[in-house]
């Protein structure tokens, strides 16, 4: 597992704490506030607009070819 994927998983665990669903915009704002590395931010910025459960977001982020 790459460092970026580990970083994404840790970010999603924190972002979804007590949250069932988040929008792509919510995830982008939280990622910026968390000061994530540029490659991880780029991946989160590429997430299609919509609302995601944690497992849906993780799957969508991993499926992105960047």
Image (cartoon, rainbow, N blue to C red):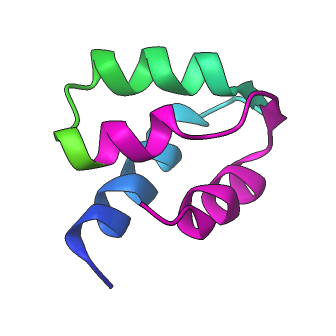
Rendered residue at 61%/17% (across/down): 25
Q: Pinpoint residue 13: horizontal percent, then vertical percent.
A: 50, 48
Asked whether, in this view, residue 15 is left or right of residue 40, the answer is: right
Q: Pinpoint residue 38: horizontal percent, then vertical percent.
A: 19, 39
Asked whether, in this view, residue 38 is left or right of residue 23, the answer is: left
Instruction: Decide: is 9 above or below 21.
Output: below
Total labels: the figure holds: 0
Q: Between 35 and 44, which is closer to the camera in this rendering?
A: 44
Rendered residue at 53%/39% (across/down): 46
Rendered residue at 47%/39% (across/down): 44
Quadrant showing the N terminus? bottom left
Instruction: Decide: is 58 above or below 30.
Output: below
Judged from this view, the residue extending furthest toward the bottom is 1
Asked whether, in this view, residue 41 is left or right of residue 66, the answer is: left
Q: Report the magenta residues as a range.
A: 40-66
Rendered residue at 61%/40% (across/down): 47
Q: Pinpoint residue 9: horizontal percent, then vertical percent.
A: 44, 59
Q: Pinpoint residue 12: horizontal percent, then vertical percent.
A: 51, 46
Instruction: Decide: is 9 above or below 35.
Output: below
Q: Between 16 and 65, which is closer to the camera in this rendering?
A: 65
Residue 58 magenta = yes
Judged from this view, the residue extending furthest toward the front is 66
Residue 64 magenta = yes
């Amino acid at each position: 597992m790459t460092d970026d994927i580990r970083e994404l998983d840790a970010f999603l665990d924190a972002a979804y704490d007590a949250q069932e669903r988040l929008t792509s915009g919510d995830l982008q704002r939280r990622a910026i506030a968390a000061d994530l590395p540029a490659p991880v931010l780029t991946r989160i910025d590429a997430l299609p607009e919509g609302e995601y459960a944690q497992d849906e977001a993780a799957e969508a982020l991993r499926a992105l070819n960047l």
